[in-house]
Image (cartoon, rainbow, N blue to C red):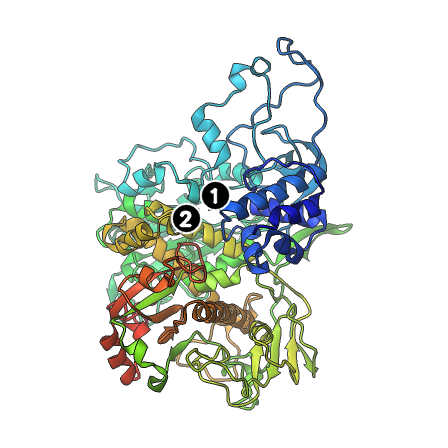
């Protein structure tokens, strides 16, 4: 990078520039685009690849050393030219500040630090004004006030005599201003409640967060903070019999308890919940507030007349049916009180609602752990938690993700809709009507025939070979392609990509409209869709999996591929000549808010488990040790939240192509999921294929840099021959430096050590046609949901 300073001066003009800390990613992008620079020319000036610069700008990778200094110089120079600082009025050191030009007062810690955005996610800008925090000029707004965040939000130089002592924040307040806590709501207001001993989870969540976690948290905006006043007692409560044995008591997420007055029936508990200050503020200004969740302990469920789990039809809850019969006394009591149930009835996760005439719908959610609500469907709650600990666990998940809505997959889908509502209220001359939200999926439509699952009506008459096949990899290198030098190595090491599907969803261009069929279309990587191409004659390295098939074997003829795969074929130098296409001409980064939200939840949870964001880069050996001891030494509550966050991301992607269930279903019939605007198998395929392409690109570049090729791949786990048992033995080059292709870390898209076994062990499994990636941790990765 010896030519970098000259290239920067060519962009900014001659003159010295002060090196500054890097601003937030959104501010970096705004400065570049407003200055009129492309990513390619900026990357060239910085002496890095376009992909590396993209990672710097988006915050997915933190530049270091000379590269960081050059990038900071560029950003500072652009900021100086785009938002010039007005000249200061001359004043003596002893003279007081003029009355008409007071020093900017520090912004209170209660005001959020999230920049205002349009419904499509773009930053809101306005005429340049002094930032309310530091006094420097900014075009950005937060809660309507001029503000910028990140490295540019530094205190302006102000004479000490001009600033009243009361205006100078204390150290803890200043720290909170610089790095707001990740909580989405303020502390609950005082309510008639008696103190409860804080659980271990409550104590751990109260300790100061690390810088890494706070930098990735999603702070609430001012509107949501104001709305939180409606729900002073948090999003949910765990209800248990009172210690006196008479009545019930509600355990809140912050360790407090609420007495439930003389409630002995489920309809009465439902009525009480609506007045208890429970609920969740909306995640989008056009969305809806979340309904309160009541979790009934086994003892509370029994007290309220709910039956235990059973296998007979005589008063027990039948797991096979998944709900209480309509003739059960509890269901009849709810109906008699004017409450309704959704189509799934009263089961492990139930929704009870009613719509009074001329009023907003009232709704309460119920979770029944006695019916396996929290021991399946992505939930893995530790045994033996008391009600306060369970409330803290579910409250931690609700704080970082959202209030649970059922399985983690259902919650992941609900989060997509909450962050990208399909419609909004629009006022017209004749009254209010429903309008579309920019960037959202507003209506349901059928997929293209090649994309549809076999049960779908549009797939009933298609050629069985005319199908878009998209699944995660399950590939084993042929035995004859394993060289003697590789066989002589003593170990195999597995590298696992963190939340690969979640990482792939960030900024991914996805379909927002119905498919349009075209013949001989010209390929455009910006158009999401399915393209029929022939990559069967491509000559690729047999030591690598073929990127165009789930089993890694070469395709046998023309086939359907998503935009992600066709774009990668062009990157590999293959001829791209589609003969057909099912294309979407309305598109956008639909899941980008979902990706950012779950990424922040994942990183916050990892930080609370003692693994900060930058540990893998700063101290790889410490990172590997921390990850190795996570299951044994980590807080069980935080581990349960971590597993739920990962399952939410994975299950949410699966819900995009939810298939019919039930023995009575017949192919060709429609099923309820098809009526959801979010249902689209193409978007699921785009995510999976993007993750596959990202992984193939890593292993291809790693092979080019080190000469090492994988033995097997199972989904996001890649198994390599290795000279030593550590991941560092695999990732170090001949000069002892770590590769920059596979990077260790907790951020989605980076990798961690999955496990190590002997080479003899791996060769024996390969001889049996069994994927070593399935058992490299010592168990069964597929059976364990990995």
Q: Quadrant of residue 478?
A: bottom left
Dot 2 falls on a residue whose secondary structure is loop
- Name the residue rendered at 30%, 32% in the picture: 195
**Left-right relation of 89 to 189:** right
Q: Which mark is residue 693?
A: none
Q: Nearer the viewer, residue 137 or 304?
A: 137
Residue 132 to residue 656: above or below: above
Q: Nearer the viewer, residue 739 or 183?
A: 739
- The picture places residue 158, in percent across and down from the top left corner, at 60, 20
Residue 268 showing in the rendered view: no
Residue 752 to residue 689: above or below: above
Mark 2, other Cα within 10 Å: few <14 / some 14–19 / many ≥20: many
**In this rendering, which labeled residue sits more in front, label 1 or label 2?**
2
Q: Which residue is mark 1?
A: 215
**Left-right relation of 583 to 708:** right
Dot 1 falls on a residue whose secondary structure is helix
- The picture places residue 330, in percent across and down from the top left corner, at 34, 58
- The picture places residue 624, in percent across and down from the top left corner, at 31, 55
Number of numbered markers: 2
- The picture places residue 327, in percent across and down from the top left corner, at 35, 66
Gap in angstroms between the C-alphas marked 1 and 2 = 9 Å
Mark 1, other Cα within 10 Å: few <14 / some 14–19 / many ≥20: many
Q: Nearer the viewer, residue 28 or 104?
A: 28
- Name the residue rendered at 35%, 76% in the picture: 711
**Left-right relation of 444 to 720:** right
Q: Which residue is mark 2?
A: 613
Q: Answer whether labels 1 and 2 touch (C-beta < 8 Å).
A: yes
Q: Nearer the viewer, residue 487 or 581?
A: 487
Q: Quadrant of the C terminus?
A: bottom left
Q: Quadrant of residue 50?
A: bottom right
- Earlier sequence position, callout 1 versus callout 2: 1
């Amino acid at each position: 990078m010896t030519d970098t300073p000259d290239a920067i001066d060519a962009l900014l003009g001659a003159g010295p520039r002060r090196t500054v800390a890097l601003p937030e990613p959104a501010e970096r992008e705004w400065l570049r685009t407003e200055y009129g620079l492309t990513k390619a020319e900026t990357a060239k000036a910085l002496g890095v690849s376009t992909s590396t610069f993209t990672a710097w700008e988006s915050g997915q990778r933190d530049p270091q050393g000379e590269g960081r200094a050059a990038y900071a110089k560029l950003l500072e120079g652009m900021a100086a030219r785009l938002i010039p600082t007005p000249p200061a009025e001359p004043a003596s050191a002893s003279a007081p500040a003029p009355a008409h030009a007071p020093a900017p007062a520090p912004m209170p810690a209660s005001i959020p630090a999230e920049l205002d955005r349009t419904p499509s996610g773009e930053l809101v800008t306005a005429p340049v004004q002094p930032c309310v925090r530091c006094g420097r000029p900014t075009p950005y707004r937060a809660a309507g006030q001029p503000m910028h965040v990140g490295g540019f939000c530094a205190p302006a130089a102000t004479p000490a005599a001009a600033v009243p002592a009361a205006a100078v924040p204390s150290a803890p307040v200043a720290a909170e201003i610089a790095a707001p806590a990740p909580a989405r709501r303020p502390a609950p207001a005082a309510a008639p409640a008696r103190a409860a001993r804080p659980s271990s989870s409550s104590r751990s969540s109260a300790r100061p967060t690390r810088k890494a976690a706070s930098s990735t948290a999603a702070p609430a905006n001012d509107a949501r903070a104001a709305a939180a006043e409606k729900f002073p007692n948090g999003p949910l409560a765990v209800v248990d019999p009172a210690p006196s044995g008479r009545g019930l008591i509600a355990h809140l997420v912050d360790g407090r308890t609420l007495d439930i007055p003389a409630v002995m029936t489920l309809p009465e508990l439902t009525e009480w919940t609506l007045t208890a200050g429970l609920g969740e503020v909306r995640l989008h200004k056009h969305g809806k507030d979340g309904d309160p969740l009541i979790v009934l302990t086994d003892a509370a469920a029994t007290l309220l007349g709910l039956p235990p789990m059973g296998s007979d039809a005589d008063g027990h809850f039948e797991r096979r049916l998944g709900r209480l019969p309509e003739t059960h006394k509890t269901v009849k009591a709810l109906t008699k009180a004017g409450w309704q149930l959704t189509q799934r009835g009263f089961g492990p996760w139930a929704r009870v609602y009613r719509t009074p005439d001329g009023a907003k719908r009232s709704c309460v959610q119920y979770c029944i752990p006695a019916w396996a609500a929290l021991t399946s469907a992505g939930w893995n709650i530790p045994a033996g938690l008391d009600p306060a600990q369970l409330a803290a666990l579910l409250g931690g998940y609700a704080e970082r993700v959202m209030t649970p809505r059922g399985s983690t997959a259902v919650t992941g889908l609900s989060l997509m809709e909450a962050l990208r509502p399909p419609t909004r209220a629009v006022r017209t001359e004749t009254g209010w009507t429903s309008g579309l939200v920019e960037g959202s999926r507003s209506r349901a439509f059928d997929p293209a025939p090649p994309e549809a699952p076999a049960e779908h009506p549009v797939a009933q008459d298609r050629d069985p070979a005319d199908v878009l096949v998209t699944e995660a990899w399950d590939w084993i290198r042929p035995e004859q392609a394993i060289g003697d030098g590789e066989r002589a190595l003593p170990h195999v090491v597995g590298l696992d990509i963190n939340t690969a599907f979640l990482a792939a969803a960030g900024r991914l261009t996805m379909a927002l409209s119905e498919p349009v069929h075209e013949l001989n279309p010209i390929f455009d990587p910006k158009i999401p869709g399915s393209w029929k191409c022939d990559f069967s004659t491509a000559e690729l390295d047999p030591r690598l999996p073929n990127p165009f098939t789930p089993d890694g074997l070469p395709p046998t003829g023309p086939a359907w591929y998503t935009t992600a795969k066709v774009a990668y074929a062009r990157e590999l130098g293959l001829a791209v000549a589609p003969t057909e296409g099912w294309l979407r001409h309305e598109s956008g980064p639909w899941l980008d808010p979902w990706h950012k939200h779950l990424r922040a939840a994942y990183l916050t949870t990892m930080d609370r488990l003692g693994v900060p964001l930058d540990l893998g880069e700063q101290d790889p050996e410490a990172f590997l040790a921390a990850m190795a001891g996570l299951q044994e030494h980590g807080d069980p509550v935080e581990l349960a939240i971590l597993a739920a966050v990962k399952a939410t991301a994975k299950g949410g992607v699966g819900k995009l192509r939810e298939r019919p269930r039930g023995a009575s279903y017949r192919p060709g019939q429609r099923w309820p999921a098809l009526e959801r605007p979010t249902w689209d198998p193409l978007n699921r395929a785009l995510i999976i294929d993007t993750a596959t392409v990202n992984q193939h690109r890593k292993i291809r570049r790693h092979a080019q840099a080190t000469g090492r090729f994988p033995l097997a791949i199972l989904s996001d786990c890649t198994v390599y021959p290795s000279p030593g048992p550590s991941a560092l033995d695999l990732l170090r080059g001949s000069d002892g430096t770590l590769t920059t292709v596979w990077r260790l870390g907790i951020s989605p898209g980076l990798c961690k050590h999955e496990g190590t076994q002997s080479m003899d062990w791996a060769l024996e499994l390969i001889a049996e046609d069994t994927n070593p990636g399935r058992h490299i941790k010592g168990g069964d990765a597929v059976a364990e949901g990995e």
